[in-house]
Amino acid sequence: MDFTLHVWRQGTPGSKGDFETYQAKNVAPSMSFLDMLDLVNEELTRDGGDPIAFEHDCREGICGSCGMMVNGMAHGPEDLVTVCQLHMRSFSDGDELWIEPWRADAFPVMRDLVVDRNAFDRIIESGGYISVRTGSAPDANAVPVPKPDADKAFDAAACIGCGACVAACPNASAMLFTAAKAGHLSYLPQGQPERYERAIQMVHQHDEEGFGNCTNHGACQEACPKGISVDYISRLNRDVLRARLAGVAFDST
Amino acid sequence: MELDAKIPSGPLADKWDLHRFEMKLVNPANKRKHQVIVVGTGLAGASAAATMGELGYRVHAFTFHDSARRAHSIAAQGGINAAKNYQGDGDSIYRLFHDTVKGGDFRSREANVYRLAQLSLNIIDQAVAQGVPFAREYGGYLGNRSFGGAQVSRTFYARGQTGQQLLLGAYQAMERQVAAGTVIPHLRKEMLDVVVIDGAARGIITRDLGTGKIEAHVADAVVLATGGYSNAFFLSTNAMGCNVTASWRAHKRGAAFANPCFTQIHPTCIPQSGEYQSKLTLMSESLRNDGRIWVPVRAGDSRPPHEIPDAERDYYLERFYPSFGNLTPRDIASRRAKEMVDAGHGVGPGRNGVYLDFRDAIQRLGKKAISERYSNLFAMYEKITGEDPYTVPMRIYPAPHYTMGGLWVDYNLMTTVPGLFAIGEANFSDHGANRLGASALMQGLADGYFIVPLTVGNHLAEVAPGGVDADHPAFRDGVREVEEVQERLLAVNGNRTVDSFHQELGRLLWDLCGMSRSEAGLKEALAKLPELRESFWRDVRVPGSGDNLNQSLEKAGRVADFLEFAELLCWDALERDESCGAHYREEHTTPEGEALRDDERFSHGAVWEFSGVGHKPARHREELIFEHVPPSQRSYK
C-alpha cells in the first residue's frame, strides 16, 4: 500500500510549525501505524532528513505514551485502540493521512507530534490517590468489596493517561481523565474517607492547568481507547456538588 | 573483587526480622537532610521513591518518560504471586519459597527468596489499601488463579492489566509524596552515568531529553530501578525504550554484573509478521491454563487448522510432560516450541509459530466462560493479527522477555559500589536461572516498598549528609565525558541508521546467544561483536543536534551500550559450561533433551568485573548454599 502523509513538523516548543508532505511506500497492511512511521523515519534518516518525533513505548496499547490525531480523529479511525494498535489494513491504498499532535493549551507541543502532558501528573498529585503509608495496610481480605463496585472501579481504572479525551474535546477538557481516577477510587471502600476532598481538589487542579470545561459533548468517550464512560463525569459532578453542599472547601496547602 | 552477600545469620524464617533489628536507623530529624536518587519509576522505583518519601528522606525520582506512570511494568498482564493461601489449597510462604528456588533451577540465594515469599503477603495488603482493583469473587473477596505452572492458586490479578493497576498504585503513592514535597520528580531525564567519589556512589549525570542539557545531581545514595536488557535482542516483548544504559554505565564505574546470560524467553508471544517489526507482543501465559498447544504431526503440513484431524495433531507438551502438560515452565515451553518450528512443524504465514487452541475449552466450558477469562486478550490478539481466536487457534512463538541477570547485589540490595543500590529487574537477586510467572511484580514491589527503604537507611546511618556538591571534579568530569560521547555520536555522520545496527545486533544474539547456545556459536558471536561495534562507530548516522529533543540520539546512546554489553552476555553464556533454567547449552542436556545442570562446577552466581571495552571481563563467583531445598533435577513429567 502507498500513502501520502501530511505531518505536523515543529522544531521546538513555541516555534512556528507547519505540515510537511511525505510519501509512505510499500506499506504492508499488517503494519501498525507506528511501524509505518518507523519506515518513513528510516528513509528520512538515510536521505539526510530529520525524522518525525513521536512518543511511543510499549506498542501494545497500555503505557499511554503514544497518541496523535489521524485525519482529525484521536488515535485514528478505529474504536478502542491506541495509535500503536491501529493497523494499516484499516486504511485504503492511496489514502491521504493528516497527522497532528494533540491540540490543547494545557498540552504544549515540544516537537513535531510530542506534547507535554505533565498537567495530568499534577491532577493526580492534587488528590488522585488513597493516603495509606507503606506497611499500614490491613489484611487484603479484611474489607470485602461488592463485585459490581469492584467492576465499576476497574472500568474507570483502565485509563492509560494518553490524553485522547482532551484532544477530542472541543473545549480541550480533561474531565474524563479526572473523573476516571476520581471514579475509580470513589467506588471502593478504601477511597471513601477522602472522596469529597479528592473531588474538590482534582477539579480545582484540572481548571488551574488550563483545561476547558465539560459541556457534555461526549467526544471524549468516543475517542477513549479504553472505552471509559462519560457516566464517571456525571458521578464526579455529583460528588463535587455534594462536597460543596457539605461545605468541603478547597485546601490550598 | 570481594563479594560478601551479607546474608544474616539465624534460622531462614527469622533472618529478615533479625536483620531489620540489627540495621542502623537514621534519626527522624536527620532523614530530611539526606538526598536519595531513585532512577526509574516502574514498580520498583516508584514504590521505593514513595516509601522513602514517606519515611522523610529527600527523594529525587528520575524517569526518561514524560510521566512516572509510563514504565514498562505497566504492560505486565498476568498477575502477582502471594502466599496468602486464600484458596486454602495448601499454599504457604515456605511453598512459594520452595517453588521459586526450584523454578530458578537452583541458581538463586535461599535467604533472598525466602524474604521475597514473606513480603509477598504485605504487597497484596498494601496494593488493596491503595485501591488496586484486583479480581474479586461475588462474595466480595479476592479471587486467585493458578499461573505459570504453579500447582496452587496464588496469583492475584486485575483482568489482563495487573502491572498497570499495580504501577498506578505505586505511581499515585509517589505523586502523593510529590504533593507533600518529599519526592521531587525529574521527568524526561535519562541517566547517563553514576558518579563515584572515594569509592561510593554520590550522584548521577543525566540528559534532559527535552532541552538536551547535561546535568549533575548530587545525593547520599543512588538507587537504580532501571529494568532489564531484553532489548539487546532488538525484537523482544519489552517496550521500545527499555535499555541497559543505566546498569551498564554503573557496571563501568565498578558495579559488578551477575549472571547476564540468564535471559528468559517467553513462550506465548505473537509471531513476527514481517521484517519491519520492531517489537513483539506478549500474550499472557494465563492462556496456557485453558489453551492446548499443538503443531501438525506432518512437517510442512499447510492445511488450515480446522482441517487437521485430532489424530494428525501433536499436542507435544502434553505428550512430553503428562503431569504438567501445557503448564510447563517458560523455558521448557519455549524450547520445545523452537524445536517444533526448527523441525518444520511451524504454522502460520511465516511458518514461525505453534497453535494455542481454545476449541476444547470452549466445548467444555462454553464460549461465555472463556470470554470472561480472556476476552481482553482475545480482543488484543484479533486487533493485531486480524484473526478471531474463538474460531481460529492463536499462533504463538517465544520471544525474549525478562532478564534474571543484572547488577550483583548483596542481601541489602546494594551493589559492589557502596551507596549504589539496584532493585527490581535491574538486579540479579531472586529468580536464579529462570523466573516463574507472576513473580516479577512481586519482586519489584518487595524491593521497592519493603526492602530498599530500610537498607538505604542502614547505609545512610553511616554517611554524613552532603559533603560534596556538583562542583566536585568527579561531577564536572562526568558531565564532560557524557557530552563527549554525545558529540562523537553526532559527528560520525555515516550511512546507516541506529535501528539497522540494533537489528543486526539482535539477530546475531538471537541466533548465537538466544534460546539455545553452543560453545562454537558463542565464540563466533564474540568474534563478530567487536566488528559490529566498530562499524557502528564508523558508519552510524545520528541526525539532528544535541540541544533539543532528538530521539535518534537517545537511541544511539542506548544501542552503543547494548553493543558493549552484548559481549558480556556472550562471555557469561560461554563460561557457564552447563545448562540451567533459561540458559540452555547444547552440549549439556539429559537424554530427554532437558537442561542438565552441573552443580559440582556451577552452583554459583557468576559475577563479572569490568576491565575495559573489548577486553575480557574478570569472572568472580558467589557460591550458593542450599540448606533447605536440596538441588534436584527439575522434572515436570
Image (tube, coloured by chain):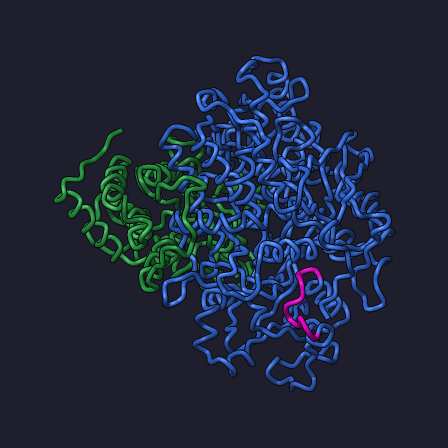
Q: Is residue B59 above or below residue B341?
A: above
Residue drawn where x is 27% and y is 43% of the image: A194
Q: Is residue B558 above or below residue A87?
A: above
Residue A122 percent location from the top left of the image: 34, 36
- Whether residue B380 is visible to the viewer of this picture, yes or no, is no
Quadrant in the rendering for residue B595: bottom right
Q: Nearer the viewer, residue B137 or B615?
A: B137
Residue B180 percent location from the top left of the image: 36, 30
Q: Nearer the viewer, residue B340 or B81?
A: B81
Q: Is residue B568 above or below residue A226?
A: above
The boundaries of the magenta stretch are B322-331
Residue drawn where x is 60% and y is 45% of the image: B115
Task: Classify residue B240 as left or right of residue A130.
Answer: right
Of the chain colours in the picture, the one used for chain A is: green
Q: Nearer the viewer, residue B319 or B563?
A: B319
User: Which chain is tinted blue?
Assistant: B
Task: Classify residue B45 as left or right of residue B327.
Answer: left
Q: How many marks?
A: 0
Quadrant in the rendering for residue B185: top left
Residue B112 percent location from the top left of the image: 64, 44
Residue drawn where x is 14% and y is 40% of the image: A247
Considering every residue shown, the one lying at the far left of the view is A245
Q: Is residue B573 above or below residue B193?
A: below
B270 inside magenta stretch: no
Task: Classify residue B371 as left or right of residue B501.
Answer: left
B326 inside magenta stretch: yes
- Whether residue B405 is visible to the viewer of this picture, yes or no, is yes
Residue drawn where x is 52% and y is 72% of the image: B387
Residue B347 percent location from the top left of the image: 66, 72
Classify the position of the C terminus of chain B by image quarter: bottom right
